[in-house]
Image: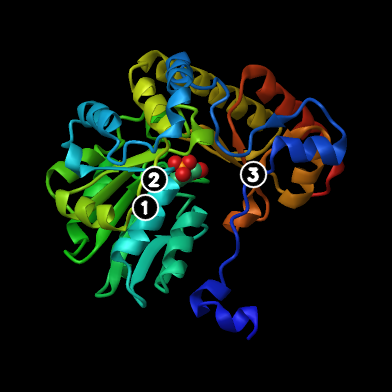
């Protein structure tokens, strides 16, 4: 029997995840030492020293399986969020929680609503479960909540809203979300993916946990990968109703979160200064990048996260390749269906300057 025949039909059409290009690969390919990676929305300031210290102390203990219930971290998150411990989800990355949402809630044929050009894992979990993704176009790179409400139906099981949205960096405001939630039927679960929550400074940003406290069918997802700079450990979390948390608990793998990830995450929550420093740097980086994009005549979408969606007016793959040669890694828009856009993560001041200098040079050479 061929591999095609052996594989579940819904898996045959899946494509493996394409990550941001790793630094080592670019070093090898181009023989460069000094690489700037602004491709995966990582935090250039790195993790809290408290997190690193906690991992050092816990390292000897990795002989034993981790705490299956993440008791210490759960208690810390419960206090941090003001949400009961049994309503908190913890996964190896919020990616795992997105995957588990599919396992717990999707039947074949269910509809999963997301924006056009979504963060890949929303589409992945839908297709993996033989559910049907329903794509609603963005309007000016923002979620169009009216159009989304119009597409809710009998079969809509999950709705994914990236807030801020990856890759455009835009938010759904409090009023927009409230209007949308009024239209959401009982059989639909709204997933508010807030991976970049800590970077948002807008007073219009909704209080998603209030919806959880009201008992709405909402799952809020957050992560330690971004502002807390623990991407390499793989740890994310979420909050939802006790009932939905119970279903998610049934599909969870045993010992899904490593000991080092648990202690580092708990220690990170005890270091608000690390978050404050990261927010300040991000604010400064965004304003520098806006200023420079404007100088270069490039349209960009003002961002509420640690990355900017910028229109380069040229084949983004070509611009990407030319930036690589100059040791700068960014993300191309084509993977999100936007062939002349780039998504660039904010970096340290010198990294942002390297990006701009390289981009300025590249734009002169690549035809528009
Ligand atoms: C919108 C969004 N959701 C979820 C994730 C996954 O984060 P994690 O590292 O917690 O799996 C990312 C990572 O890039 C993201 O951009």
Q: Is residue 96 above or below residue 13?
A: above
Foreground tag (1 vs 3): 1
What residue sits 65% from the left and 32% below the top?
293
Is disc 1 in contact with disc 2, using a CB cutoff of under 8 Å?
A: yes
Is the CB atom of the residue marked by disc 1 within 8 angstroms of ligand 1's nearest atom?
no
Residue 7 in view, yes or no: yes
Q: Nearer the viewer, residue 213 or 168?
A: 213
Q: Which numbered disc, 1 or 3, marks the residue that appears first in the sequence?
A: 3
Q: Position of residue 202 (x, y in %)?
A: 35, 30
Q: Is residue 358 above or below residue 133?
A: above
Foreground tag (2 vs 3): 2
Q: Nearer the viewer, residue 125 or 36?
A: 125
Element under label 2? loop
Image quadrant holding the N terminus, namely bottom right
What residue sits 50% from the left and 77% below the top?
8
Is disc 2 in contact with disc 3, using a CB cutoff of under 8 Å?
A: no
Q: Nearer the viewer, residue 322 or 29?
A: 29
Q: CA distance from mark 2 to mark 3?
A: 24 Å
What residue sits 41% from the left and 70% below the top?
129
Q: Nearer the viewer, residue 222 or 250?
A: 250
Residue most toward the front? Answer: 63
Is the CB atom of the residue marked by disc 2 within 8 angstroms of ligand 1's nearest atom?
no
Give the number of the disc on residue 20.
Answer: 3
Element under label 1? loop
Q: Which numbered disc, 2 or 3, marks the residue that appears first in the sequence?
A: 3
Residue 338 in view, yes or no: no
Give the number of the disc on residue 256.
Answer: 2
* Res 239 → quadrant: top left
Dot 3, how many residues are within 10 Å of its Cα: few (below 14), some (14-19), or many (20+)?
Answer: some
Residue most toward the left? Answer: 214
**Which residue is the site of mark 1?**
253
């Amino acid at each position: 029997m061929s591999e095609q025949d052996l594989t579940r039909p819904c898996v045959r059409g899946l494509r493996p995840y394409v990550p941001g290009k790793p630094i080592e690969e670019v070093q090898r390919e181009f023989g460069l030492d000094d690489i700037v990676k602004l491709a995966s929305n990582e935090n250039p300031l790195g993790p809290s020293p408290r997190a690193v210290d906690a991992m050092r102390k816990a390292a000897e203990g990795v002989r034993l399986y981790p705490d299956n219930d993440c008791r210490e971290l759960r208690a810390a998150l419960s206090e941090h969020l003001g949400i009961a411990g049994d309503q908190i989800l913890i996964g190896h990355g919020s990616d795992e929680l997105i995957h588990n949402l599919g396992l717990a809630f999707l039947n074949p044929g269910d509809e999963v609503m997301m924006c056009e050009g979504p963060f890949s894992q929303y589409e992945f979990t839908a297709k993996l479960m033989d559910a049907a993704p329903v794509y609603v176009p963005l309007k000016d790179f923002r979620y169009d909540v009216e159009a989304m409400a119009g597409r809710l139906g009998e079969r809509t099981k999950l709705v994914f809203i990236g807030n801020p949205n990856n890759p455009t960096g835009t938010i759904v405001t409090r009023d927009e979300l409230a209007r949308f939630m009024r239209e959401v039927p009982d059989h639909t679960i709204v997933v508010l993916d807030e991976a970049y929550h800590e970077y948002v400074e807008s007073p219009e940003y909704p209080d998603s946990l209030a919806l959880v406290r009201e008992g709405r069918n909402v799952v809020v997802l957050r992560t330690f990968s971004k502002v807390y700079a623990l991407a390499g450990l793989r740890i994310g979390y979420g909050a939802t109703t006790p009932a939905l948390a119970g279903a998610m608990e049934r599909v969870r793998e045993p010992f899904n979160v490593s000991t080092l990830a648990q202690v580092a995450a708990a220690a990170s929550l005890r270091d608000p200064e690390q978050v404050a420093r990261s927010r300040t740097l991000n604010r400064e980086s965004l304003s520098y990048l806006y200023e420079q994009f404007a100088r270069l005549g490039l349209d960009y979408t003002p961002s509420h996260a640690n990355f900017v969606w910028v229109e380069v007016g040229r084949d983004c793959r070509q611009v990407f390749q030319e930036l690589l040669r100059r040791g700068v890694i960014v993300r191309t828009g084509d993977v999100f269906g936007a062939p002349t856009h780039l998504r660039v993560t904010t970096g340290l001041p010198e990294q942002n300057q390297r990006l701009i200098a390289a981009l300025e040079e590249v734009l002169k050479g690549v035809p528009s």
